[in-house]
Image (tube, rainbow, N blue to C red):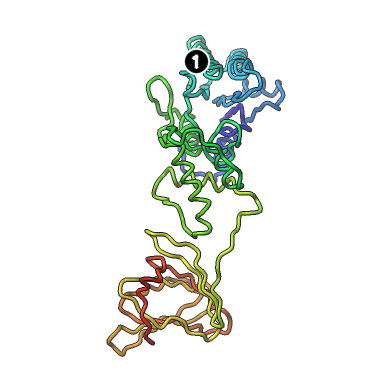
Amino acid sequence: MNILITGAKGFVGKNLCAELKNIRDGKARTYKLSGDLNIMEFDKDSKPEELDEYCKQADFVFNLAGVNRPEDPKEFMEGNFGFASTLLDTLKRHGNHCPVMISSSTQAALDNPYGESKRAGEQLMRKYAAETGAKVIIYRFPNLFGKWCRPNYNSVVATFCNNIANDLTIKINDASAVLHLAYIDDVVHELIAAISGEEHYEGEFASIPVVHETTLGHIVDLLNQFKESREKRSIPDMSDPFTKKLYATYLSYLPTDKFSYPLKMNIDNRGSFTEIIRTLDRGQFSVNISKPHITKGQHWHHTKNEKFCVVSGKGVIRFRKIGTDKVIEYPVTGDKIEVVDIPTGYTHNIENTGDSDMVTFMWCNEPFDPEHPDTYFEEV
């Protein structure tokens, strides 16, 4: 199947091309679309003869080319309406009546140069469909966000993500302003569904099924939380779909020399203990390193519970139920990674029985609170 994508180097085009190539190469199996895909990419630096050849071969066309912020408002009509005319004329010249998708905007309902150019493109597509019988799919996209979106261009989310991640100032005109946002992965999934004729509609226009409504102030609050999360060792609420998508977007704007960040290692002669992540609802995640023949622990909890997972070295975890004498032992090794639950009411310890450092990944059901530690010393 030959798929032509105009505007292939733009935000939507780049993401769509990447996922279609994943499908083509057998790396993405969540779609009904399959088979031999030939992805023909056309952008503003491509040669006109390439468009002519692509229009001759195309089985489906995504027209994502467009102008968003030209120096001269007249370029809106030239870039959005003019190129669409050229594309459709080329398809007609080759007698190719394959389906054509066009990316319009919710601003097509507004009387401004950009909206007028988008509306003209929609009318052109409908006229083309009436003349040729070709299937035409018109999407009026809301504001879009996600990785690879150009900051300081036409996306406030991209701009704020970039600036906050890079310690640059942001300007908020109206924190209560309501935005309707579609995430790029949701957009790409919908566009790929359209190839198989399974696009979604809202009235006369094809639509993205998942659109998030939020305020500018809420976006800024979340982005500041994301930035602070490194110092606080916290993780955003991934159960909220918008937060999950915005956090993924934010991370894509991190400066390349700041992908890593330091953690506080609590070091003594026994080894070290390092907290990695703490959450209010999913507990605390840490790494414990024990020197050879060192025993740690020797305490029990009323309600606090843990999971230990030795990933390197070897040792033994011992338990004794409070009020009894019987000691239970669980050998552990990085050669056979498994999780050992630490139940409440059992004093416990972990000993490194090897000759090298033992590394243990630890989860606790709650972040450590020095005011209420729920930890009581008692040797196993």
Q: Is residue 188 left or right of residue 86?
A: left
Of 99 and 106, the residue lying toward us: 106
Q: Position of residue 107 (x, y in %)?
A: 49, 22
- Seen in the picture, residue 259 relative to 142 is either above or below; the reply is below
> In this orientation, does residue 36 appear?
yes
Q: Quadrant of the C terminus?
A: bottom left
Q: Residues within 10 Å of mark 1 (few under 14, many from 20)?
A: few
Residue under the point 45% across and 52% down: 236
In this rendering, position of residue 346 left or right of residue 116: left
Rendered residue at 59%/13% (across/down):
92
Quarter-wise, where is residue 43 in the image? top right
Q: Which residue is mark 1?
A: 111
Residue 59 shows up from this direction: no
- Identified by mark 1, the residue type is Asp
The percent coordinates of residue 42 (x first, y second) are: 65, 27
Look at the numbered disc 1 and give the secondary structure of its residue.
loop
Q: Nearer the viewer, residue 323 or 197?
A: 323
Count of number-bearing discs = 1
Q: Residue at x 45, y 70 (%)?
A: 362
Q: Which of the image's four quarters has the N terminus?
A: top right
127 above or below 284?
Answer: above
Taking the view exactly as shown, the residue that stands out farthest to the top is 131
In the orientation shown, which residue stands out farthest toward the bottom? 325
- Judge by depth and name the residue closer to the eye, 290 or 329: 290
Q: Residue 327 at x, y = what percent?
A: 35, 87
| Relative image position of residue 20 (x, y in whole percent) | 55, 37
Residue 60 lies, with reference to residue 343, above or below; the image says above
Which one is nearer the viewer's eye here, 114 or 184? Answer: 114
